[in-house]
Image (cartoon, grey):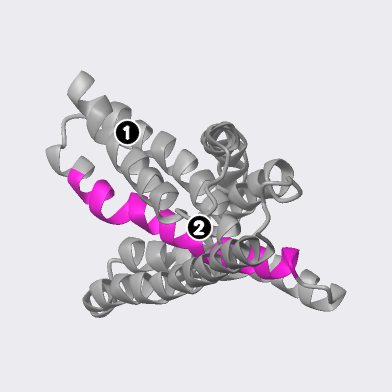
Amino acid sequence: MIRLWMIAVAPGIALALGIYLTDRYDREPIGLLVKVFLLGALSVIPIAVIESILVRFNIFSGVLGVVYVSFIVAGFTEEFFKRSVVLRSAYNHSAFDEKLDGIVYSVFSALGFATVENIMYIVFRFSANAYIGLYRGILSVPAHMLFGVTMGYYLSIAKFSMDEEIRRRNLKKALLIPMLLHGIFDFILMSKIPMLMVLFIPFVLYLWAINLKKLNRYVRESKDKHKSIIDRKDFDK
């Protein structure tokens, strides 16, 4: 049982540590990161309630039913609450002072949720299946992290924009685009359509490519900001 718990928890902790270390120029307060992670974990409760209600309204059959579950039940509900965690806990915090921070907080929220979800699958629902932990550790938990990168990218654009229309538009994108990516990810797996399954690995590689590009962009901005601060201090001496 202890081994199952370790398998379930390890991916989320490892990815959270990786994101924390990536933010090396102006790291976020540990206490706030733990808070966001735990609130992300607790979001499992309202998500489970809402998803159970939405499933009852699935009047569709076949592929349309899978679309509904993938994009609405899972994609919309989970990304909505993960975004809400960031908006309520970190978005207006003074520590959120550069664009990279949006990605860091969104990823911690996403990984908090993904870790509890992983525990539910590996420890309780499929404890007899040795491959579930491997599959979820390689695909599902990293996918939640990548959705979080996309979410944080647009949240940061919203936070630091002086234009109210741009701010509102990107707050919406911070929900809708992760929801779309999440829905496609789930739909490919749940539909069990052979042609789509062929596209699954390319889609996962696409997720990594676009989100690493977003992450690297904000890391460079953080580095440049840090360097300019140091240069200014040296100039003032």
Whether residue 97 appears in magenta in the rendering, the answer is no
Seen in the picture, residue 233 relative to 218 is either above or below; the reply is above
Q: Position of residue 155 (x, y in %)?
A: 66, 63
Q: Looking at the picture, which amino acid does disc 2 mark?
A: Gly
Span highlighted in magenta in the image = 134-160
Whether residue 144 appears in magenta in the rendering, the answer is yes
**Residue at x-position 42% and y-position 34%:** 116
Residue topped by disc 1: 9
Outermost residue, left side: 130
Residue topped by disc 2: 148
The tag earlier along the polypeptide, 2 or 1, is 1
Density class for disc 1 (Cα within 10 Å; few <14, some 14-19, many ≥20) is many
Q: Position of residue 100 (x, y in %)?
A: 55, 61
Q: Nearer the viewer, residue 95 or 64?
A: 95
Work out which quarter of the rendered image holds the C terminus and state it.
Answer: bottom right
Q: Quadrant of residue 221?
A: bottom right
- In the shown orientation, is residue 99 left or right of residue 203? right
**Are discs 2 and 1 less than 8 Å apart at CB?**
no
Q: Position of residue 33 (x, y in %)?
A: 55, 39
Seen in the picture, residue 73 relative to 60 is either above or below; the reply is above
- In the shown orientation, is residue 40 left or right of residue 165? left
**Residue at x-position 26% and y-position 47%:** 137
